[in-house]
Image (tube, helix red, strand yellow):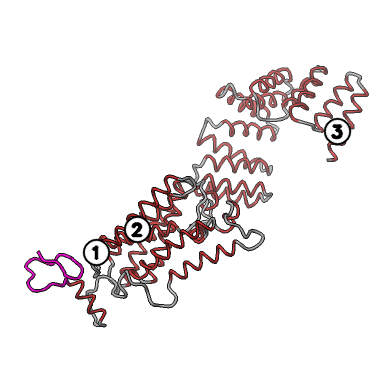
């Protein structure tokens, strides 16, 4: 079987006399300006020939990344060789706690950010070479779409694989360009010499393999982003080469790109559902901590509306309601948590506190008793049970529960103060004073503890100590 004398492809069987394949014939016709409705690949400059236009899209992408980097060098940040994580997040880095909690635009902005001089230098060097090759092959708008889609795919892979890693740089999109070129060179039809095609394909494979290996050897390199860009690029390049190779059929090419874009959007949505809930809750809690409770509660309400079975969401919302003294709503949310997860210790404990705030000590006692039965080693459970018993005047039983809470290590401060209060009601003033003093040693100064000491000291006739405690209480309240 004969080969084409220009590109080296196999000619059809029984070819007699013809030494040039039809792809080379088409390319020659296009170069002469003759129309050909069956052109399957771009016949603008061949892939190894750079565009002669003054400003290319590669120049624009290069300039955009450089402009952002120079902008970050302005005071008060620069000039610096490397940027910290906080500054990169401020400028739009891809970071799970932000990206997955609503800042989806970071999946685009991160690819124009770079962490330092060496980072941007290496990426721009790669972009200059691969971008020019890709632009000459696909044309400006297909090339732009491939760049953005594969960069987006790399960002999705990054937050999906490890949402706690901060990701910046054009490398995801650059790997996407490499993947698209590999697939198109392997599956497409090009009127270039076979030796040039094989050489370019080999170079691309070495580039991808070496950089993935290098990324796996050193910490801080986001290989998930590289793999996401490469795989999406391979898919895009293969679809373009097989389904829409014609440069004169933009509708088909746009259809391929649209389908891939929808697929990536679906992947992003899936990653958001899989990984996003804890980060969205964290963002809402940040709003609460920043004294913006209405915003935080609205964010949590949106989370539980979208994910009605989210235990974390309902629990955080219940706590927010309780802190804002929206007791009825807090009660409903804690009950919802216990419906979803009956063994949830925190929700059961806080439901008991809700009942105490509603002056329902018997209901609180039942809840805390169930918690202690469920978790006998729960210090918080014994503490809550002591509070419920004390509210009902059962102070000796309350003291026993407070002692158990201290022995088991309750996480709540104030247990010594509550025990001192119960001792006072039992007229056991020495024990009350000892409890208050232990509370001061453990939890620090507190005006309520000092007032408890005042009462206990006065009951024992220790007037000087009572006056000293009263003075300390007044000073603490002024602070």
Residue at image position (44%, 57%) is: 171
Q: Are marks 2 and 1 in contact (CB under 8 Å)?
A: no
Which residues fall within the magenta stretch? 1-21
Left or right position of 394 against 136: right
Q: Measure the C-alpha gap from mark 2 to mark 1.
A: 20 Å
Q: Give the image location of residue 441, x and y in percent.
A: 77, 26
Judging from the image, what secondary structure is the residue with disc 2 in?
A: helix
Residue at image position (28%, 67%) is: 244
Q: Measure the C-alpha gap from mark 3 to mark 2.
A: 71 Å
Residue at the bottom extreme of this rendering: 33
Q: Is residue 218 above or below residue 111?
A: above
Q: Is residue 239 magenta?
A: no
- Crowding near pointer 3: few (<14 within 10 Å), some, many (20+)? many
Task: Name the disc covering residue 195, or none.
Answer: 1
- Crowding near pointer 2: few (<14 within 10 Å), some, many (20+)? many
Q: Give the mark, 2 or 1, whose residue is nearer the N terminus.
A: 2
Q: Measure the C-alpha gap from mark 3 to mark 1.
A: 89 Å
Q: Please name the predominant secondary structure of the magenta segment in the image.
A: loop
Along the line of sight, the residue nearer the viewer: 190 or 397: 190
Q: Would you identify the image quadrant in which residue 186 lies?
A: bottom left
Task: Name the disc covering residue 179, or none.
Answer: 2
Along the line of sight, the residue nearer the viewer: 42 or 101: 42
Judging from the image, what secondary structure is the residue with disc 3 in?
A: helix
Q: Identify the residue position indicated by label 3 in the image.
A: 473
Q: Are marks 3 and 1 in contact (CB under 8 Å)?
A: no
């Amino acid at each position: 079987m004969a080969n084409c004398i220009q590109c080296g492809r196999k000619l059809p069987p029984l070819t007699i006399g013809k030494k040039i394949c039809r792809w080379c014939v088409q390319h020659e016709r296009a170069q002469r300006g003759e129309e050909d409705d069956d052109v399957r690949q771009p016949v603008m400059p061949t892939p190894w020939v750079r565009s002669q236009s003054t400003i290319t899209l590669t120049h624009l992408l290069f300039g955009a990344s450089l402009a952002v980097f120079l902008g970050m060098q302005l005071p008060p940040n620069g000039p610096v060789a490397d940027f910290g994580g906080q500054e990169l997040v401020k400028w739009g880095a891809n970071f799970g706690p932000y990206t997955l909690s609503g800042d989806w635009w970071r999946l685009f902005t991160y690819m124009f950010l770079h962490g330092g001089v060496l980072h941007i230098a290496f990426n721009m060097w790669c972009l200059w070479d691969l971008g020019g090759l890709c632009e000459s092959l696909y044309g400006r708008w297909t090339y732009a779409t491939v760049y953005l889609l594969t960069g987006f795919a790399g960002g999705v892979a990054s937050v999906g694989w490890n949402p706690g890693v901060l990701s910046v740089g054009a490398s995801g999109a650059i790997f996407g360009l490499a993947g698209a070129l590999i697939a198109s060179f392997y599956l497409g039809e090009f009127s270039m010499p076979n030796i040039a095609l094989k050489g370019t394909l080999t170079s691309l494979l070495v580039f991808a393999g070496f950089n993935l290996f290098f990324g796996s050897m050193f910490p801080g390199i986001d290989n998930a982003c590289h793999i996401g860009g490469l795989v999406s690029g391979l898919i895009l390049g293969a679809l373009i080469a097989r389904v829409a190779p014609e440069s004169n059929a933009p509708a088909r090419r746009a259809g391929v790109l649209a389908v891939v874009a929808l697929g990536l959007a679906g992947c992003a949505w899936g990653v958001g559902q899989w990984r996003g809930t804890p980060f969205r809750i964290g963002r809402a809690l940040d709003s609460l901590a920043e004294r913006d409770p209405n915003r935080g509660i609205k964010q949590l309400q949106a989370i539980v509306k979208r994910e009605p079975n989210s235990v974390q969401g309902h629990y955080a919302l219940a706590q927010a309601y309780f802190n804002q003294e929206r007791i009825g709503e807090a009660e409903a949310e804690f009950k919802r948590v216990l419906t979803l997860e009956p063994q949830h210790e925190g929700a059961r404990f806080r439901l008991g506190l809700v009942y105490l705030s509603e002056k329902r000590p018997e209901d609180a006692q039942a809840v805390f008793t169930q918690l202690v039965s469920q978790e006998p080693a729960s210090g918080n459970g014994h503490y809550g049970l002591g509070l419920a018993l004390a509210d009902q005047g059962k102070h000796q039983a309350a003291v026993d529960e407070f002692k158990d809470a201290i022995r088991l290590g309750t996480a709540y401060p104030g247990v010594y103060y509550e025990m001192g209060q119960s001792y006072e009601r039992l007229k056991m003033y020495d024990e009350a004073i000892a409890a208050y003093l232990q509370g001061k040693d453990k939890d620090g100064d507190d005006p309520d503890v000092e007032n408890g000491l005042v009462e206990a000291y006065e009951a024992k006739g220790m007037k000087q100590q009572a006056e000293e405690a009263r003075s300390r209480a007044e000073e603490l309240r002024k602070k």
